[in-house]
Image (tube, rainbow, N blue to C red):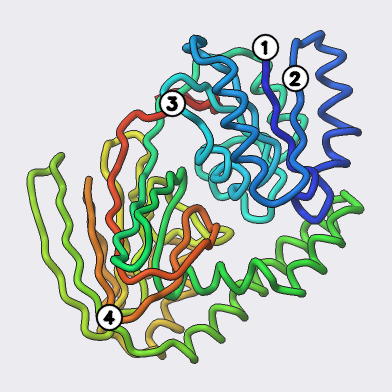
């Protein structure tokens, strides 16, 4: 049986239309056995995932399909009791869909469903776990599939979540034809670039310390960045709608790839940012690549933090670890 969590609000309501006009008819035609769960408000996907996994604790191959965006997948991960017992399927209907982009999951919802219905062998995939270390707040952990970050990139995510331009582009996409979808994609890129420029100009001077431990390659690194802009930790290559901050990231190698940006002028960051769409930004001094199985960071001031583009709070410090082979996922290629 397929357990399908549907985010009807994904892409400003387009998720509901995709379900009713494309996915549900195809499922009925295929005679697949499935059960649906619709999220009706923010935070409900987590509870639905928790409910589904709690009701099937003895199923070692629970088939859970997410119809939504990367944020919907992230929310579901927070509710899954034991990711190793889940076979995750993804029908991408979000704005960025960086997870689908990196895994070559079809952009067209019907094609993504066809992939899931083949019952192909899933691939084993790493997850990341971020744990906040703020002394004045309770300890909290969040899983992520794509990336987590603190500073500039998280601030961009925080503002983009409430951007009226992005909402407008998502409403345009409801017409569901190629020209408007291309307009939406281009509009999203311009939205993110505009927000990034604003956040870059207004960014405050913050310092940070990083401790990186890579048990796979047997090395440890301690870094101090007096003028810190952001650090992103990635299990996949893309975030933010196609920025390839970590072009060497591999979702099954047991390590996280990191991009740290600090001790660099804002002008140079502005110069490098467009090249990050192609993973060519490391030509700028102050932008550095690292690998780690575990990482901890402490900042001099609280900054926004994101997991898979979902921003929940500001923090002065957290640790991140790679959970090697934590979940199975249906993709066109098995590694």
Left or right placement of residue 323 versus residue 174 in this view: left
The reply to whether callout 4 and callout 3 are in contact (CB within 8 Å) is no
Secondary structure beneath dot 2 equals strand
Could you tell me residue 252's position as x and y percent? 34, 34
Residue at 74% from the left image edge and 42% from the top image edge:
7
Badge nearest the viewer, 4 or 1: 4
Could you tell me residue 93's position as x and y percent? 72, 44
* Marks 4 and 3, the one that precedes in the sequence: 3
Q: Nearer the viewer, residue 143 or 193?
A: 143
Q: Which residue is mark 2?
A: 35
Is 23 located above or below residue 97 in the figure? above
- Spatial CA span between label 4 and label 3: 35 Å
Q: Which residue is mark 4?
A: 300
Q: Which residue is mark 3?
A: 82
Left or right placement of residue 221 versus residue 312 in this view: left
- Spatial CA span between label 2 and label 4: 48 Å
Q: Name the quadrant containing residue 128.
A: top left
């Amino acid at each position: 049986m397929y357990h399908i969590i549907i985010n009807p609000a994904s892409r400003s309501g387009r998720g509901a239309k995709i379900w009713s006009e494309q996915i549900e008819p195809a499922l009925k035609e295929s005679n697949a056995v499935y059960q649906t769960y619709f999220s009706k408000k923010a935070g409900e996907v987590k509870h639905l995932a928790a409910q589904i996994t709690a009701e099937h604790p003895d199923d070692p191959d629970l088939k859970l399909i997410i119809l939504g965006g990367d944020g919907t997948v992230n929310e579901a991960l927070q509710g899954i009791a034991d990711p190793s017992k889940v076979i995750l399927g993804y029908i991408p209907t979000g704005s960025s869909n960086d997870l689908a982009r990196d895994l070559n999951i079809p952009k067209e919802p019907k094609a993504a469903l066809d992939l899931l219905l083949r019952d192909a062998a899933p691939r084993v995939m790493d997850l990341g776990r971020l744990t906040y270390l703020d002394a004045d707040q309770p300890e909290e952990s969040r899983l992520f599939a794509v990336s987590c970050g603190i500073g500039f990139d998280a601030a961009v995510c925080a503002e983009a979540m409430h951007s009226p331009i992005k909402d407008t582009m998502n409403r345009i996409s409801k017409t569901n034809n190629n020209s408007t979808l291309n307009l939406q994609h281009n509009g999203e890129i311009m939205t993110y670039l505009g927000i990034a420029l604003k956040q870059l100009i207004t960014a405050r001077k913050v310092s940070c310390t990083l401790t990186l431990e890579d048990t796979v390659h047997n090395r440890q690194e301690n870094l101090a960045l007096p003028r810190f802009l952001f650090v992103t930790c990635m299990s996949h290559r893309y975030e933010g709608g196609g920025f390839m901050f970590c072009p060497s990231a591999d979702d099954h190698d047991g390590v996280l790839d990191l991009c740290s940006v600090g001790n660099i002028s804002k002008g140079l960051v502005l110069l490098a940012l467009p090249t990050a769409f192609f993973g060519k930004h490391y030509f700028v001094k102050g932008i550095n690549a690292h690998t780690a199985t575990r990482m901890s960071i402490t900042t001099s001031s609280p900054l926004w933090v994101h997991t898979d583009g979902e921003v929940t709070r500001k923090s002065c410090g957290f640790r991140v670890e790679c959970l090697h082979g934590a979940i199975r996922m249906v993709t066109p290629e098995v590694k």
